Amino acid sequence: MFRWLLLFILVVPALEIGIFVWAGGYIGPWWLILLIILTGVLGAWLAKQQGLETLRKAQESMSMGYPPQDSIFDGICILIGGVVLLTPGFITDAIGFCLLIPFTRRPFKNMFQNIARKWMDSGRFTIYRR
């Protein structure tokens, strides 16, 4: 897992710089800066909206006596998506928007659930209950 994270940290910024240079030459630097600011603002608004909706769903399920397991993984995806959207770049923006939009979030949510399940099975992650 650390290898993939290291590869992500090294490769994605290089690709982002290449795309910035290409897009800046194609649409101009001022439009590029405006587009970066626009995606950041839109992403912050979407993260807030989705985060509040997820919090409402979690409170609703807990008030009925059910654990908010789906809402927890939705919240993880929204948090990661919001952080990634604050990073300037088109690749990271695409990943961030995929994590924030509910119907494109599902594969990521399933991936995070499988990772958590593997961690619990291997003993790395423990849930304490009273």
Image: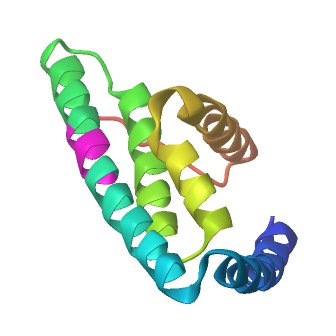
Query: The magenta stretch spans which residues?
Result: 47-52
Look at the picture and state if 128 lies above or below 53.
below
Q: Is residue 11 left or right of residue 45?
A: right
Q: Residue at x 74, y 80 (%)?
A: 9
x and y percentages locating residue 5 in the rendered image: 76, 72
Q: Is residue 53 magenta?
A: no
Q: Is residue 109 left or right of residue 34?
A: right
> Which is nearer the eye, 55 or 20?
20
x and y percentages locating residue 52 in the rendered image: 20, 41
Q: Residue at x 66, y 32 (%)?
A: 107
Look at the picture and state if 94 lies above or below 17.
above
> Which is nearer the eye, 66 or 100?
100
Q: Residue at x 46, y 37 (%)?
A: 101
Look at the picture and state if 37 lies above or below 128.
below
> Which is nearer the eye, 57 or 34?
34
Q: Residue at x 80, y 85 (%)?
A: 14
Q: Is residue 13 left or right of residue 30?
A: right
User: Which secondary structure dominates the residues rendered in magenta?
Assistant: helix
How is the structure coloured here? rainbow
Q: Is residue 49 magenta?
A: yes
x and y percentages locating residue 40 in the rendered image: 39, 68
Q: Quadrant of the N terminus?
A: bottom right
Q: Quadrant of the C terminus?
A: top left
> Which is nearer the eye, 42 or 64?
42
Say which quarter of the image contains residue 79. Answer: bottom left
Q: Residue furthest top?
A: 64
Q: How many marks?
A: 0
x and y percentages locating residue 67 in the rendered image: 32, 24
Q: Residue furthest left?
A: 63
